Amino acid sequence: MASHTPSIFVHSSSVPARRKCSFLSFTPLPFTSRLSCRTQRISMEIFCSRNHDAPEGSSHQCDSSLTSTSPVFCGGIKAISRAVLYSPDTKVPRTGELALRKAIPANPVMKTMQESLEDISFLLRIPQRKPYGTMEGDVKKTLTTAVNEKQSILGSVPTELKEKGSQLYDSLVNGKGGLKDLIASIKENDPDKISITLSSTLGTISELELLQAPGISYLLPEQYLKYPRLTGRGIVEFIVEKGDGSTFSTAAGGGPQKLATIQLVLDGYSAPLTAGNFAKLVIDGAYDGIKLKCTEQAILSDNELGGSGYSIPLEIMPSGQFEPLYKTTLDVQDGELPVLPLSVYGAVAMAHNADSEEYSSPSQFFIYLYDKKSAGLGGLSFDEGQFSVFGYTTVGREILSQLKTGDVIRSAKLVQGQERFVLPVSEG
């Protein structure tokens, strides 16, 4: 089943009822942004509510012809908009690494420790005097939890992985780049050193969590067992080449390169069917030699791969839920946010099916080039919650902006996660 190759945003009459509305295209480029009529209206109302805060006599007055709303309603929207913008639930991960850490279905004790440390990342962004005392208190609390809950932490690791789990635990508590090192860095009041040590500590926590979560923690609907699936994490490596014979500039400063490497981490915990279908296409060599289409917003695989891949139902794991939703989008304006957000530079998702937005394209994927300047409320993409996001670019992000239409995926390989890949019984 082919999809419309000029755009990844395919509109059809089969959109779920609550999402039916007209869309605006901001650009004639192949990759077109959509802004729902509801989002337009609320954005205008918030603009109006802000104008009501202007001093009397100010030229900033509410234009009722734009909003068709009363000042009273504008004030209500103002309160709602503040709730959307400042609610803790809108702390959407802004990097692929953070999104992937938050998506691991691990031991609750580990999740509590992780969240406490993730908060330090936000505290480090404070531009003036940083709350080092609060940071130190958070890490000391985390260290106490790690020591007191050692049995619970290691008890969640499968027997065959206990040795590795013990090594990671020791590294987390006492090792270089661990919690004690992090406390010492904070005492030095050096933001750069804190950031480096924090990254190392969170990396160790992530490795421990992955040991605790050897597979998906829920049962897939029986009707979807006919699809390939990924029951954990996988890594796909693309080798890309310039179509015009020019070169790439690498972050390592190694000089111009004819070939560049991009790695995508696939998350089968949150999108097992979508990630599984993509992994199968990679294993089958379907993306080898495929040309790319590039716009300011995304990098798309060119065209459909004649009969390759499965038309997987739209698959989105909402935050706070334990299993994905199928064939339905999320309403961000009502506070519904995905575990794997699109609003991250380098997010990887499937295009929509040509016939129904309830399904993804069998093979056409895109890498989203998130830009906060063109985002909506809370820095969220206008298309947040509308696509099956199944992974993130973690290596070679600097290459993404250098890709142009006509560049080629020379090869695509599943370099990690083969043991998590499951074929349907009919193909096994």
Image: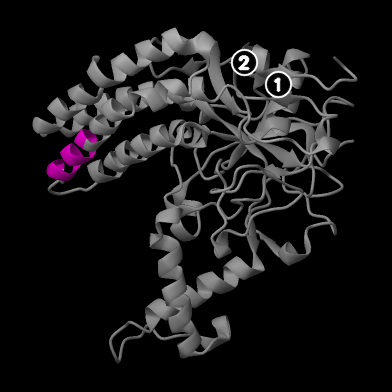
**Cα distance between the residues tagged 2 and 1:** 9 Å
Q: Position of residue 380 (x, y in %)?
A: 50, 53
Quarter of the rendering containing residue 140 = top left
Q: Nearer the viewer, residue 246 or 366?
A: 366
Q: Which mark is residue 417?
A: 2
Relative to 387, 340 lies left or right: left
> Type of residue at label 2?
Gly
Q: Nearer the viewer, residue 399 or 171?
A: 171
Classed neighbour count for the residue bearing mark 2: other residues with Cα under 10 Å, few (<14), some (14–19), many (≥20):
some
Give the main secondary structure, helix, strand or loop, of the magenta stretch. helix
Q: Residue at x 85, y 24 (%)?
A: 308
Q: In the figure, 154 relative to 385: above or below?
A: above
Q: Residue at x 66, y 18 (%)?
A: 420
Relative to 69, 326 lies left or right: right
Q: Residue at x 45, y 54 (%)?
A: 90
Q: Which residue is mark 1?
A: 279
Q: In the figure, 421 relative to 62: above or below?
A: above
Sequence-wise, the earlier of marks 2 and 1 is 1
Asked whether the beta carbons under mark 2 and mark 1 sit within 8 Å of each other, the answer is yes
The quadrant of the picture occupied by the N terminus is: top right
Q: Magenta stretch? A: 132-140
Q: Position of residue 285 (x, y in %)?
A: 76, 13
Secondary structure of the residue carrying tag 1 is helix
> Type of residue at label 1?
Ala
Secondary structure of the residue carrying tag 2 is loop
Relative to 349, 141 lies left or right: left
Quarter of the rendering containing residue 55 = bottom left
Q: Position of residue 403 (x, y in %)?
A: 57, 27
